[in-house]
Image: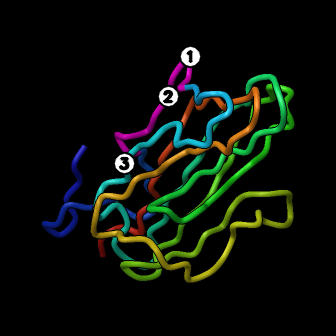
Amino acid sequence: MTIFINGVVGLPDGVTHPLINTYISGSGTAGIDNTAQDVKTVVVPANTLTQVGDRLRIRTYFRGDTGAGITATTKLNTVVISEATDSGGADWFMTEAWLHYITSTTAHIAETGSVPATGDNSADNVAGFDWSSDQNCVVSQDMVAGNHIVVYCIFLDVYPKGVK
């Protein structure tokens, strides 16, 4: 639904909307054993965030297969925003990172971790983004003998500041 505010397309404060590129699968996308690789990629469209106050939450749901411990890493435009390691028990994991627009090429990252702390990838004024261009959101796995990850969901939720 398109909303016009003072003749400009925009969203009012407090409105959350998922990006059309959100990925959800009942069977998932599996990586390959013994291979460091990008398992699933979705695109965050250009100008998803455009002003201070705009936020993007990226959540990834995955599990490892059976085998040795394996790490899944989520990156946006090559910047690591979250990661988690399955110790080999085929457990379910969810990673979550909030990106807060600062400039056209930087953002604060708040990786959700153990309360009250945040994850190791949390940082302020992180460079490496290009909010005026399409950016790939990639879920990768490291190389582990006899194990791979299966990515089931990548949720891309936008929390815009709105048009004033």
Q: Is residue 34 above or below residue 135?
A: above
Mark nearer the N terminus (3 vs 2)? 2
Between residues 80 and 111, which one lies in front from this camera angle?
Answer: 80
Of badges 1 and 2, nearer the viewer stands: 1
- Residue 66, image x, y percentages: 80, 22
Q: Quadrant of residue 120?
A: bottom right
Q: Residue at x 22, y 49 (%)?
A: 2
- Residue 68, image x, y percentages: 84, 33
Alpha carbon separation for disc pair 1 and 2: 9 Å
Q: Is residue 85 above or below residue 51?
A: above
- Residue 72 is left or right of residue 119, and the answer is left
Q: Quadrant of residue 99?
A: bottom right
Between residues 38 and 102, which one lies in front from this camera angle?
Answer: 38
Alpha carbon separation for disc pair 3 and 1: 21 Å
Q: Residue at x 53, y 65 (%)?
A: 79
Callout 2 secondary element: strand
Image quarter hosting the C terminus: bottom left
Q: Amino acid at mark 2?
A: Ile
Q: Residue at x 37, y 76 (%)?
A: 51
Q: Which residue is mark 3?
A: 43
Q: Which residues are magenta?
A: 19-29
Q: Is residue 23 magenta?
A: yes
Alpha carbon separation for disc pair 3 and 2: 14 Å
Q: Which residue is mark 1?
A: 27
Instruction: Examine the residues drawn in magenta and state their main secondary structure.
Output: strand
Q: Which residue is mark 2?
A: 24
Is the residue under label 2 in contact with that under label 1 (CB below 8 Å)?
no
Q: Amino acid at mark 3?
A: Val
Q: Is residue 38 magenta?
A: no
Callout 3 secondary element: strand
